[in-house]
Amino acid sequence: MVSDVSAAVYVSGTPASIFKQFSVRDFTLNIFIASLSALHHFRMDSGLALLSFSRRHTSAGILLLTILLVSLSAQAAQSDWSETPQAKARLLIAAVESKNSQAVLKAGLEIQMDDGWKTYWRTPGAAGIPPDVKAAQGSPLDNIQLYYPAPSRLDFQGLQLYGYEKRVIFPLDLTLKLPLQEDATIAVDTRILICRELCIPVRFKSEIPVSELPNLATAQSGVLDADAAFSINQFVSRIPRPADLAGFKPAKVQLDSEQKILQVELQLPESTQLQDLFPELQPEPELNAPVIGLPEALPGTGSQRWTAQFLIQRKQMPSPDAAANLVIRTSQGDFELPMRWQTNSAPLNPIEGTQVKGHKGSVPGMDGAPSIAAPLWLMLLMALAGGLILNLMPCVLPVLSIKVLHLIKHSELSTSQIRGSFIATAAGIISSFVLLAGALIALKASGQAVGWGIQFQQPIFIAALAFIVIIFAGNLRGLFEFRLPAVISSLGSTINQETPEKSHSLFGSFSQGALATILATPCSAPFLGTAIGFAFSQDYLTLLLIFITLGIGLALPYLLLTLKPEWICKLPKPGHWMLTLKRVLGGGLLVTAGWLFWVLSDLIIFNGVVAIASLALLWWLMVRRHRLFWLIPVAALLIIPTLPQPDIKLTSSSADGQDQLNWAAFEPSQIDKQVAENKVVFIDITARWCVTCIANKVAVINTPEVQQALSAANILPMRGDWTRPDATISDFLNRHQRFGIPFNAVYGPGAPQGILLGEILSKKALLDALKKAAGDI
């Protein structure tokens, strides 16, 4: 039996044990602070945007730059592929861990198989052999510890198999024999069984010369290959977690030898749904797929009792004297727990329930899924178009309106000054995209999941953005005027000092561009999802290039106006109407802040949201009286990390009165089951912070025509909520090469592989997909 292992995380230059304590929330806050530091030291020199850091703020900039450069330059530590006609394998070395005068390599054995081929888990099921990984002869390895990601249930002509299809990485701990010889080679010998209609035993030998690695005898703990660390950690996260850490009690198991029934009972929290079970018994019996009964509530405990039964087919009966183990798949992830044998005083009665269905074969890519093999020039063109279209999204429109108002106010500026203002705004946009790319590269290098808009799952980010929007609104409503320090004002000013009332700071234009970028991230647009999905599947340099192109696309209107700045002179002249417009725009920003607090209510307790909103109101009322009241936003942000999440579980059903559908909770394992019953499944992955998702609901999903179509008896609407981090949803999106939302797909008898819809829904596209999935087209 493999010992328990936690999901290790690797980060460039940082021991894993330290980084485990470094949360995404902390990282987001540090990047946010670094971004503000960059903004407050912005200079303009001959129309070119330059970022400069003062001596006391240099450390923040160097930290971000170091993370980016180290991530980009991590040393590759991968063997060549060892191939057979049906499969191939290679060894990945992600990091080295130095402890107790020993060096342990954090590695992974990656196996890729052709469509239809499979290999096996440590307990293979009705047939099969588990992998055998050993040190090759002459290899300087003292020990190999193999860890198993949770398996899939595979149905082969009624036989229940536990294993993996297409691709799997088995995490490894390789303990080295020190000292190492310079000509030594780290080599592992792997023997696995791969099966389709027939089974073939294959052998792979994977080698990495020690000379291609740093001096492992003296190396400190840290990353050797950031790409390998990211890949391995995707499968480390699938290793079943010890159930006692989640407060689960050991399961009870009973055996009725006469009826050949194995019954398992376990107690789970009310919010946790049981999806599948993988018993590990000795001797190993051949079990049918389990039948899972309805849960029984246990009053006063906050838990419910689940019962599952397996019919035993061939092979021998398990022995109640032998230790028994159980891996369960739940709506909260995979867990491992012991089973305790119970003596049954009477024959077991067969239960009524739902039988778990196994995958009957590999699932190729979905219709409409982006191909990561697309040429780079095409992806750059899509990124440029996606960034340009973002200007029309509701997230960015408030900032565009502020920019237009700003230019009307300064309509007497010269052509060169207007051009400088547009260049500063474009520089703010592009620089912010570079910072965002750097943050995502660092997260990816650490092995964490990345995606478009994931920062909106962090309450401290949402609260900080809400206060920034409120401050901009207060400025528009006349609560205060931005007065920068004299040094920055003099650097950014392009107006004669004799007319200070007309002073025009380029810093303000730069900050407007940065705010436009931040507000754009919860939105999606045509071409944007494809470009983002391509970027996250490529190397760091390509990811950075894609994000720079996105920034250029979003900044393109400003860059084009630098060619003809005199067009601004055609805007209406300043007048009393501007005061009314400023109040309207300020009100729009307050509505945006209210939406952000609404999103925040799903991430922290309601009383906490009330407290933060009250502090924002206090700042609004008192900011004119004393400068000390500017500390209120800082105090509010310091409170956020101390506030717990709300106890209530996020609902997957809509609270919109126009939505009359009975939405099922998102469970990927149920898709194939429903399709097998000739049902059409419509998947909607949404979040409160996703503005495009909300627009899709209003314009398409909640319309009477679509509501009527989705209410048909043969259609099951299924909704997942990604407002909070959710590993099940993240994994589902990753499998379909999508790294952001909205995500909409339709499955059915006519499209069992799924039809992937665009980010911006249309009634026609959705209704046609429903007909095609049902087999009517």
Image: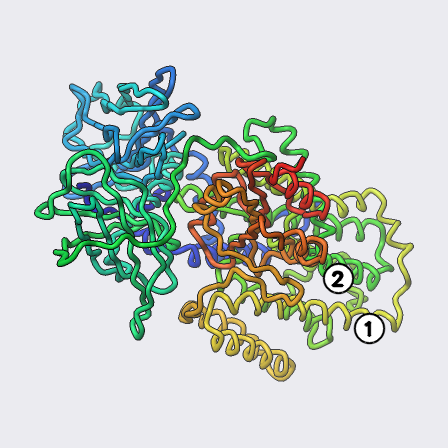
Q: Dividing the image into 4 quarters, which one contains the C terminus?
A: top right
Q: Residue 222 at what x, y percent from top left?
A: 31, 41
User: Looking at the picture, which amino acid does disc 2 mark?
Assistant: Ile
Q: Residue 116 at what x, y percent from top left?
A: 41, 26
All told, the count of numbered labels is 2
Provide the residue designation for mark 2.
Answer: 402
Kindly state the secondary structure of the residue where label 1 is placed.
helix
Q: Is residue 384 above or below residue 451?
A: above
Kindly state the secondary structure of the residue where label 2 is placed.
helix
As drawn, the label of residue 364 is none
Q: Residue 208 appears in which quarter of the rendering?
A: top left
Colour convention of the picture = rainbow
Q: Residue 247 at what x, y percent from top left?
A: 26, 62
Q: Residue at x 21, y 27 (%)?
A: 132
Q: Is residue 52 visible?
A: no
Q: Residue 431 at what x, y percent from top left?
A: 61, 47
Q: Residue 210 appears in which quarter of the rendering?
A: top left
Residue at the left extreme, as displayed: 321
Viewed as shown, does residue 18 lie left or right of 518?
A: left
Q: Residue 592 appears in which quarter of the rendering?
A: bottom right
Q: Residue at x 27, y 61 (%)?
A: 267
Label 1 vs 2, first from the N-terminus: 2
Q: Dividing the image into 4 quarters, which one contains the N terminus?
A: top left
As drawn, the label of residue 579 is 1
Q: Residue at x 51, y 47 (%)?
A: 451
Q: Is residue 680 above or below residue 176?
A: below
User: Looking at the picture, which amino acid does disc 1 mark?
Assistant: Leu
Residue nearest the observer in this picture, 49 or 198: 198
